Image (cartoon, grey):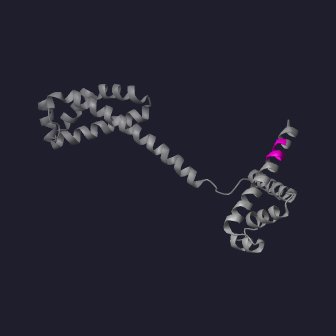
Amino acid sequence: MEALAQRIRTGDPDAEQGLVDRFGRGVRAILWNVCRDRSVVDDLFQETFRVLLQRLRAGAVRDPSQLGAFVASLARNLATEHYRRARRSEGDSSARLERLEDPRPSASELVTRAEQAVLVRRIVEELTVPRDRDILRRFYLGQESKEKIQADHGLTNLQFNRVLHRARERFRELWLARSATSEGEER
């Protein structure tokens, strides 16, 4: 093996062909056990010998007497790296697809939102306490500032928070009751 490595270092094309003839069958067998895809095996076969010849020409193979083990290890490593890159690119592809996804809601989502908005307005109107209706309508639906609503109702910040909390709780009770009723009707 050392003589073959020396001939390759000097640029002997017959020695390079001899290297491929000697190890080619074993490299294909290793790659086939890992890949099972003819085109991938062919690509990795070429890459294995390209890297091997490059290292032999540069004198970068430490022990030419162990060339068989080096070739086998190189083929396995290239196959492993090929599949690592493939997995990473699959992840990148799905991430790219997610970024390309249309951020706008679908037609069914728009219909659902519109139905829920109508239901929210109905439930707000069903609240028995007028101040609850006014605060929820202005704060959430009208998106008025907290300070303006507080001033109109003569409430401190703490009082406003308590009134808003109680109004939301009353709303939630009606919402849950309505949801339970509509679920019972669907069955």
Tell me the residue at 77%/65% (across/down): 135
The answer to which of 77 and 19 lies nearer the viewer is: 77
Answer with left or right where residue 31 lies relative to residue 109.
left
User: Does the image show residue 47?
Assistant: yes
Task: Work out whether 139 lies above or below 94.
Answer: below
Secondary structure mostly taken by the magenta-highlighted segment of the chain: helix
Q: Is residue 187 magenta?
A: no
- Magenta highlight range: 176-180
Q: What percent of the width, then of the height, locates residue 55?
A: 20, 41
User: Which corner quadrant of the image does residue 14 belong to?
Assistant: top left
Q: Position of residue 45 (x, y in %)?
A: 33, 34
Q: Is 97 on the left-hand or right-hand side of 128? A: left
Answer yes or no: is residue 111 visible.
no
The residue depicted at 12 percent of the width and 36 percent of the height is 6
> Number of marks in the image?
0
The quarter of the image holding the C terminus is: top right
Residue 119 at x, y percent in the picture: 83, 54
Which residue is more in the foreground, 137 or 83? 137
- Against 77, residue 130 (above or below) is below
Q: Is residue 30 left or right of residue 18?
A: right
102 or 76: nearer the viewer: 102
Q: Quadrant of the N terminus?
A: top left
